[in-house]
Amino acid sequence: MMSQMSEALPSHRKISDEQFAFLAKYLSSKYGLRVPPEKRILLESRLISRLNSLKFDSITEYLDYVFKSKEAHHEYQLFVEQITTHKTFFFREAYQFDYLTKLLPDYTQKVGVNHVVNIWSAGCSTGEEVYTLGMVLNEKRATMPHLDFRITGTDVSVPSLKKAAKGLYSIIESENIPDNLKTKYFNNQMTAHGPMINFSNREVVAKIRLGVLNLNKKHYNLPNTFDFIFCRNVIIYFDAKTRSEVLERMVERLRPGGYLFLGHSETALGTNLPLKSIQPTIYQKI
C-alpha cells in the first residue's frame, strides 16, 4: 500500500536518491539514527506531511527551507519530531514497572531510606512513560511511606516535550491507564480536539523535570547520577556505533547497583559494559 502511494506521487514530491543519501547521512551523524533504504518510503511520507502543512510544492523546496532558511527554527523542530517520534503509550511493557516496584524495597534499604530515588526516562517522547513512572512510584508509597523520588524525562524532540509538559492526552492515548489511576491522577477536560484527560496530580508533577537531550551528544548535561534508567525502544533506531556509545554513556550515569531497562527488542548483551542481566531487557550495574 505504501509503495503504491509513493509511486502515485509526482516526481517532485518524491525524495530523490541524492536527497535520501543526504538525509540518511545527516540523521546518522547528527542523531545516530539508522535510515536504511527500506525506510525511504516512510521517511518520504513523513516529509510529505510537513510539506503539505506548509503548502510547499516539492520536497526540494521543503528541504531548502528547513536547512537553509534562517526563519526555519520552529519548522526544523517539527522536522526532527517527524523523523524521531515513535509510538508510545502508558504502561508499555507493564511487567517492567511491576519488576521496578519489586526491586524498590531491597534497593532503598541498600542505598538508605532517606535516599531520593532518581529515575531517568531517556527518549521520553510525549510523556507517557514519565507519568507512568510517576504513578507507579507514588502508588508504591502506600507500602513505602519513606520513598521519595525524582524523574528526569529527556527527548530530542521539542514539540514532543511540550506535549509531555502539558500532560494532556486523548481518550485513545490513555486507554491503557487503569480506571482507578485515571480517576486519581487525571482530570477530564473538553478541548477543541474533543474530550481529553489531563495529568493533574501536583505532588507527582513537582517531582518531574523535562529537558531536551540528543543522546548522540558526547556529553550529557544532566544533574544527577541515576538509580534507574529507562531507555526503551530508543536505541533500536540507532546504528551499531551510536548504540554502543549511548549505552556506555548511560551506564556512566548509572549508580553502582542501579538498573537499566531496555525495550523488548533491545539488548546490552555482548558489550563490555559493567552490567549483569537480571531479566530479559533488565540489567544491573556491577
Image (tube, rainbow, N blue to C red):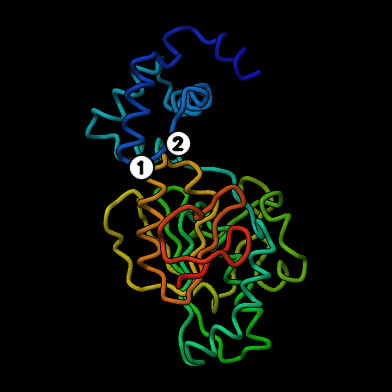
Tell me the kind of residue under disc 1.
Tyr
Image quarter of residue 272: bottom left
**What whole-number distance in Å separates the C-alpha atoms at marks 1 and 2?**
10 Å
Residue identified by numbered label 2: 83
Rendered residue at 42%/10% (across/down)? 12
Position in image of residue 56 (x %, y %): 40, 19
Tell me the kind of residue under disc 2.
Ile
How many residues crowd around disc 1 within 10 Å: few (fewer than 14), some, or many (20 or more)? many
Position in image of residue 283 (x %, y %): 53, 65
Residue identified by numbered label 1: 31
Position in image of residue 44 (x %, y %): 48, 23
Give the answer, above or below, for where 256 lies relative to 76: below
Quick one: label 1 or label 2, which is nearer the N terminus? 1
- Quarter of the image with the N terminus in it: top right
Rendered residue at 45%/62% (across/down)? 153
Q: Nearer the viewer, mark 1 or mark 2?
A: 1
Give the answer, above or below, for where 162 lies relative to 79: below
Q: Is residue 205 left or right of residue 24?
A: right
**Which of 125/179 is in front?**
125
Rendered residue at 36%/23% (across/down)? 62
Secondary structure at badge 2 equals: helix
